[in-house]
Amino acid sequence: MLAGALVLFALVMALLAWAFVKPAAGSRIPVRFWLAGGGLVLPALVLTPLILVAIWSGDRLVLHAGTEVPLRIEITARQWQWDVAYPDAEDGPRASVNLLHIPAGRPVELRITSADVIHSFWVPRLAGKIDAIPGHINTLRLEATVPGIYRGVCAEFCGGGHAGMNFTVEAHDVAAYAAQLARLADSADDGPADTRSAEAAP
Amino acid sequence: MTDSRATNPSPPSPLRLHKQLDAVWGTPPGWGRLKAVNHNIVGRRFIVTAFVFFVIGGVLAMLIRAQLATPRSAFAGPEIYNQLFTMHGTVMMFLFAIPMFEGLAMYLLPKLLGARDMAFPRLSAYGYWCYLFGGAMLIASLFAGVAPDSGWFMYTPLSSRTHTPGINADVWLLGVTFVEISALSAAIEIIVTILKLRAPGMSLDKMPLFAWYLLVTAFMMLFGFPPLILGSILLETERAFGFPFFDPTRGGDPLLWQHLFWLFGHPEVYIIFLPAAGAVSTILPVLARREIIGYTWIVVAVVALAFLSFGLWVHHMFTVGIPHLALAFFSSASTAVAVPTAIQIFAWIGTLMAGRPQLKVPMLYLLGFFSVFVVGGLTGVMLAIVPFNWQVHDTHFVVAHLHYVLVGGFVFPMLAAAYYWLPHFTGRRPRYDLGVPTFWLIFIGFNLTFLVMHWTGLMGMPRRVYTYAPDAGWTWLNLVSSIGGFMMAMGFALFAADMFLQARFGRRGARNPWNAPTLDWATPTPPPSYNFASLPSVADRAPLAATPDLGVKLAAGNGYLGFVRDGRLETLGVDMVSGRINQVIRLPSPTLLPLVSALATGSFFVALLFKLYTLAPIAFVAAIATLLLWTRTTGARADSGPVAIGHGEAALPQSESPAAPARQAMGLALAADATAYLSLVFGLLFLWVVAPNWPPPELFQPGIAVSALAILGSVVAALAGQQAALPGSLASGTRREGWLALAIAGNGLALIAWVLLLAAVPDPARHGYAASVFALLTYTALHAAFGILFAAYGIRRSRSGFVSAARALDIAVLAPWHSFTLALTGVTLLLLHGLPMAMGS
Amino acid sequence: MTVRTTIGTRLAVAGLAGGFCVWAVCFTALYAVLSVGCAWNWQEVSLGGLSALRLGLIAIWLAHVVLLVWLFAVLRRQPAESASAPAAIFLRRAGLAATAAAFCAILWLGLTLHTTQICA
C-alpha cells in the first residue's frame, strides 16, 4: 500500500509541477481524459483489487482458518490493569494480572471484556486491536509462532491511567506453558505470585 | 437578459443611491453594533471569532507537543493533559472549522449569488451569539480547570457520571449543543439562500460552484448534526437523571453513543472539507486563467461524496467487535469516497494543465493543499482497509492522517481563501512580502510535525498517552514533531500579523484585482451594507467575464431594485431551478432581539449546567417567547399585489408568495427534526437488538383508550391545520381562526394522552427500555405542545391583521407542523405497542 | 408556469438525489438486517445450501439494484420538451450521471456479500 500510495502521490505532484513548468501544456488534452481517466478509471483500477484482498485477508484473520478449537483465555480490563483468567488450565482455573501467558505455535482465543470503561487490547506484534467494552465480550484469535515476550498496551483512551496501562504477553513452548500455568495463583485477587506489571506507570 | 429594457424612470446619482440604501441597510454605530444582523458584519464576526478560537486551539496543541517532546516529561500530569487534547479537538472541530466556514459562507454567499443579504439575517445573528456564548462557556471551563477530559468524542462510560463525576462532561455536552444551534440555523439559512435568493436568471446550471458546494454541505449538516444533538441530550439526561441509555448494567449500551457520535462525526469531516474544496474550485480557475473543467462532473461528485460520507461512520468503530461482513460494507463505502474525491482532484489538475497558472500567494497555498491533502486521502484509503485499520486504529498514525486531511483539506484552502478574498474585505491591494515566508513556515512545520507521526504510530505509539517510556523508541520522532509544531505556530503568528498589517496599512486598490468572473467581485470593496446598489441579471456562469464593468453599472442603479421603497430592506427571490423572479423579499432591520434570545437560550444552558432545574424551564419559556417576538415587525397588514422591481417588471411580496423562504425553511427544520427523532427510534431498536441485559424487567403496555385519544387528537390537529391554510378558510377571519382553535383542541387532547402515558411508564432510571420509551413519549408530547403554541400564534397573527386570502404565509408556514406531529404520533404508538409484542414472542 | 416549475424541481431532486437515496436505503437495510440476523442466529437457518441470512442480504441487494435500473430508465425517458432550457439539460445530464454513480456504488457494495463468514 505504501508503494502504491507513493506512486499516486508522485503522479499528482508531477502533473502539478508540469502545469507550472509548461503553461497550457494540457490545453489540448480532452477534458474527459482527466475526469474519466483520473477520476474513474484510476481509482477503480487501484481500489478493486485492494478491497478484494482486504476482505479476503480480514476473513482469514477473523477465522485463523483451518485450526482445531483453540485454547480459551478470558481477559477483563479495568482502570488501569488487565485481569487474565485461564479457565481451561489443567489443574483448575488460574489467574494473572498484566501478564498473559500463551502457548507458542497454536492459536489462542481471547475473550475480552471490561469491568468499567472502554479499553482496547493491543499487542502490535501479534494481532490487530480489539476493544474491551463493558457488557460485551469480544473475541480475538491470535498466535505467537515463536516463544518470546511481546509488549501490549491499552489503545483506547480510558482516563487518567491510560498511558500506563501496559501488559506483557509471554509465549512459551507447550511444555513450559503447562508448568507456567501451574505456578500461577488460582485467582488474581489472592496476591498473585506473578504480577510483573510491564512498565509500571510513572 | 432584460438589460436591454428600459431602466427606472429617474435613477438617482450613484452616490445618492448609496446614501439612501446605506441609511436603511446600515448598522448603527456604538452600542448599536449589538443590533447587527447584516451578513457583512455577522460573517466577519464569525470569521474573526473562529480565528480567535483557532489560536486558542493552537496554543493547546503547543502545550500537547511540549508535553510529548520528551519521554517522562513532567510538564503536565494526566489530569491536565487529558483536558488539553480533549479541548484541542473540541475547539478545532466545533469552534473553529465549522464556524469559520459558516462565516465565510455568510459573507460571500449573497455576493456570489447577487443578493443583498442572507434569507434570515436575524437567524444569522442569533446563531452567532449562540456560538459565541457556547464557545465562551467551553473556554471558561478550561480556565476554571474543569474542562472536558474524556476525549473529543466523549466515549461513555468514561464520560458517564460514575467515571467523570465532575462538571467536565456536562460542559462539553451542553456547550457543544449550544454551539450546534448556530450550525443548524446556518444550515437552513444557507440552503434557503442558495435556492431562493439568487440573481434573476441564475438558473441552477449557472450557479457558481462554490454555491453548489455550500448547498450540499448545508444539507449534510441538516442530517448530520441531529444525531449528535440527540446523543448529547441522551447522555446529559443519563448524567443528570440517571436514565441508563448507555449503561450496560441497566439495559443501555456504550456502543449506542459511538454510533450516534460517528453518524455525525464522519460526515462532519466532509462538512469541513467540502466548503474548502468549494473555495479551491473558485480560486484555482481564476489563478489558472481558465474556466474550471467538468462543472457537471464536479456537481455530481460533490453530491455523491455527500451521500457516501454517511456510509462510513463505522470505520471509526472497526475494533468494537462488529461482524466482519458489516465492517466490509463500511469499508466499501470508505473506499468508494475516493472516487468523487479523485474526480475533483483531477478536475483541478486538468484546469491547471489547460490554463496558464500564476504562482501568486493564494496559488502557493493551493499547492500546499494538494500535496498535504493527497497524502491524507491516500492514508485514508489505507485506514478504510479493515485488517490495516485493526493495527493502526487509535495510534498516532490516525492522528497524522486526520491532521493531513483536516489541515490539508481545510486550513490550507482557508489560508488561500484568506489571501484571495482579503482585498475584498478591505478594499486594499494584496501584498506578498510576508505571505511567502509564512507559507514555508507553515508548510514545512506541518510536514515535520505530522509526516514523522505516521512512523510514530506504526511503531506502536497509541493516541492520547500523556507520557511514554524512553526505551519505547519514539523519542526522537516525538521531538521532531514538537519542533515542527512550534515552527508551524510561528507561521500562523506571522499569518495573523500579515493579515493585520495588510488590513490596516495596505494601499487602496481597484475592485477585482484577480480578474475573477464571479459576482462577489462586482460589489464595491470593502462591500457596502447592501452589497449591490441594484441587483444584476445573470445570463451565464461568468457574469463579470461577459460584462467587466457590471459593478459600475449596478452601482449606477441599472439593475433591479435600484431604489429604496418606504425605508424597506428589499431583495429578490427566484424560482429554485430556473432562476425566474417570483417574489420581492423584505428583510429585517437591525435589532437587539437575536442577542436577547441568545441570552435567554444561554441562561437555559447555564441553568442546566449548574443543575438549577427550576430556573431551566423559565429560561426555556423566555427563549421561546423572545423568539416569537421577532415576528412583530414582519409581515404586512394589507394586501399589496405585485410591486415594481425596476425594468418595468413587478413581483409579489414574499408575504403573498406561495414560494416564500420561510415555508421552505419550515420544511428543512422538520427534516432535521425527523432525523433527530429517527435517531431516537434507532437508539431504542439498537438497544433492543444489541444491548446486554435485555429483555427489560418490566414491559410498558400503553392503554388502548389513551392511545386512541392521542391518535384522535393528532388527526384532528393535522386536518384542522391543513384546513386553516386553504384559500377558502383564509378568506374569512372566523373560519381560519375556528380551524386553528380546533387545531389547538386536537393538540391539547393529544397532549393529555401523552402525559397520561408518561405517567404510566415504568421508572425510566431502571432500564434502557423504559428510558427510551420515556424519551420517545416526551419527544412526541413536546411536538403536541408546540402545536398548541403555533396554532395560538396563528390566531394572534390573524387577529392582528397579518392574514388574508393573499397573505397566507403565517398560517401556511405552520400547517406542516401538525401533520408532522401526526406522523410522530403514528410511529411512536407503533413502537410502543409493537415492541412488547415482538419481545413477547 | 407553476406546474412546469414543480415538475422541473421534482426531476432535479429525483435525478440528483434519488439514486443515492436508493443506495443509502440499501446500505441501511443490509446493515440492519445483518445486525438483527446475527443477533437472532438467522445465519444458521439453511435454505438450499446457503444460510437464510445471506440469501436475505442478497435479495435486498438485488431489489435495490433493480430499483436503480428502473430509476435510470425513467430519468432517461424524460420527454425532450422539458429539456429545452439549459437548466433542464444540465439537470437531466447531472441526474443521469448521479444515478449511474449510485449504480456503481451499489455494485461496489455488493462485492462484499461473498465473505466466507457472515457473523464473525
Image (spheres, rainbow, N blue to C red):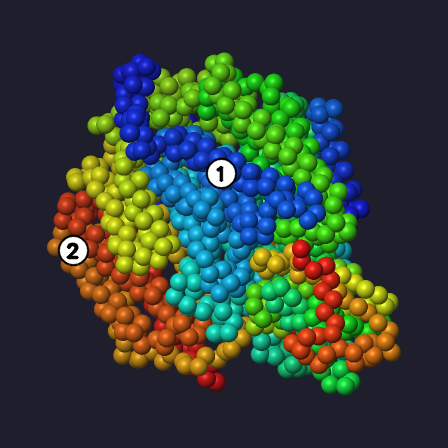
Callouts 2 and 1 in the same chain: yes
Image mark 1: chain: B
From the viewer's perspective, is residue C50 above or below residue B719? below
Q: Nearer the viewer, residue B753 or B95?
A: B95
Q: Quadrant of residue B433?
A: top right
Q: Circle 2 is placed at which residue position?
A: B737
**Mark 2 or 1, closer to the camera:** 1
Q: Quadrant of residue C68?
A: bottom right
Q: Circle 1 is placed at which residue position?
A: B53
Ranked by sequence position, the earlier of labels 2 and 1 is: 1
Image quadrant holding the N terminus of chain C, namely top left
Residue C40: where, in percent of width, then height?
Answer: 58, 79
Inter-mark Cα distance, 2 to 1? 49 Å
Q: Quadrant of residue B361?
A: top right
Q: Nearer the viewer, residue A110 or B517?
A: A110
Q: Residue at x 41, y 68 (%)?
A: B243
